[in-house]
Amino acid sequence: MSNKVCRVGLIGAGSMAEYHLKGFRAAGADIVGIVDQNYEKGSAFAKKWGIPGGCFSSLDAMLRSYPDIQAVSVIVPNKFHYPLVVEALNRKLHVFCEKPPALNAAEIQQMADCAEKHNRRLMFNLNNRARLDSQYVKQMARDGKLGRINSAQATWMRRTGIPGFGGWFTTKAISGGGPLIDLLHMIDLALWFMDYPEPEYVLAQTFDTFIDNPEFQGAWGGIVSTSGTTDVEAACHGFVRFKTGQVLSIHNSWAELVKGEDTFVALQSTKIGVKIRSVNNANTCELYEQENGISKDQTLRFMNDHDMGRTHMPENFIRSLNGEQEPLTDAAEAVKLMKLIDAVYLSAKTGCPVRINGVACEPL
Ligand SMILES: NC(=O)c1ccc[n+]([C@@H]2O[C@H](COP(=O)([O-])OP(=O)(O)OC[C@H]3O[C@@H](n4cnc5c(N)ncnc54)[C@H](O)[C@@H]3O)[C@@H](O)[C@H]2O)c1
């Protein structure tokens, strides 16, 4: 019998589950069951997508019916990533988990330790890494074509983009925070291009202007409830200096008076400058060079990349487990990402620059 990973379960039948299912199937895996605490929702999803086992109330119940499941996807609100990932790893399953990896660095460190202890793969849906333009830029960086990246800007700003106003996204105890942690993709992308340097200092500020104003609700999340909780930030701006001398600025918002949604990473490198931007699912990559006194710019368009890598990433999880591709994410980088997020929130809370030293993160 083949050792290939080909029997997978899903946990969570929400908005992202369809992408996971399509990605796993594209890699040749069978989805045998789905867990959701909302039985009707999980059953409807199973029926729509032809999942033979249907919906289960817990991972334990699914594994009792299908003990040969080799991997699961965790696609539930952020607070439940940690307990479900740890439970699955302890059951000797490989795990693909939605972003953010966890609510904070302490949780993701324990998740990573658990994966190492059981020798299981733990990957995250940092799906923008799987976009065609991101792959192109990463390959340029690997090939040394960019030179050293001195500075980067990571931006995901929305004018009216509060997801699920008054629902779990805007409830800190469940989401971990607002746009900084929800829209962490561009931060991850910039760090990935820079080879995840060690941060040293962070200075940041969050703002809650408009966070309780339903006029600023976006398309995601669905729920509109003026009596629901809205205790997260509406915007976050910050600056990071790395031990290497590189720097990164961060601009994330759900609700700010800007022209409209803007999602990009810009890199100022020693050989070629880069800006990749996702607009209406058509991604562009601008390249800036100086050659013999001439400013030479190119714009590459990546047209058929409709879902921001959301299908390619789960496909990569299965294919990398089966030795067909290199894994696009790993738990060690997820730990670094969450340490940086923790430091940004600490700086905003204390009003002080924060020094990150190994595991410690302290206001100066
Ligand atoms: N990568 C992306 O582009 C992207 C986009 C949106 C959301 N997300 C992430 O996906 C995750 C899920 O978000 P969503 O929008 O699908 O949420 P959702 O609210 O649409 O769906 C969540 C589902 O999980 C179920 N659920 C909740 N807690 C559970 C538990 N403990 N056990 C079993 N089922 C449980 C709910 O009943 C629901 O069906 C979040 O972590 C979110 O940050 C990622």
Image: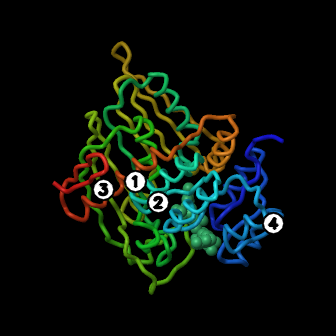
- Local packing at callout 1 (Cα closer than 10 Å; few below 14, some 14-19, many 20+) is many
Compared with 39, 206 (above or below) is above
Compared with 211, 85 (above or below) is above
If you read the primary sequence from the N terminus, does the residue marked by circle 2 or circle 3 appear first? 2
Query: How far apart, in angstroms, are the residues tagged by discs 2 and 1?
Result: 8 Å
Give the number of the mark in front: 1 or 3: 1
Q: Which residue is mark 1?
A: 338
Compared with 140, 278 (above or below) is below
Q: Amino acid at mark 3?
A: Val
Q: Which residue is mark 4?
A: 53
Query: How far apart, in angstroms, are the residues tagged by discs 3 and 4?
Result: 43 Å
Cβ atoms at labels 1 and 3 below 8 Å apart: no
Q: Residue at x 60, y 48 (%)?
A: 120
Q: Which residue is mark 3?
A: 344
Work out whether residue 38 or residue 153 is closer to the camera in this orientation and state it: 38
Give the number of the mark in front: 2 or 3: 2
Q: Is residue 127 in view?
A: yes
Q: Is residue 279 in view?
A: no
Query: How far apart, in angstroms, are the residues tagged by discs 1 and 3?
Result: 10 Å
Cβ atoms at labels 2 and 1 below 8 Å apart: yes
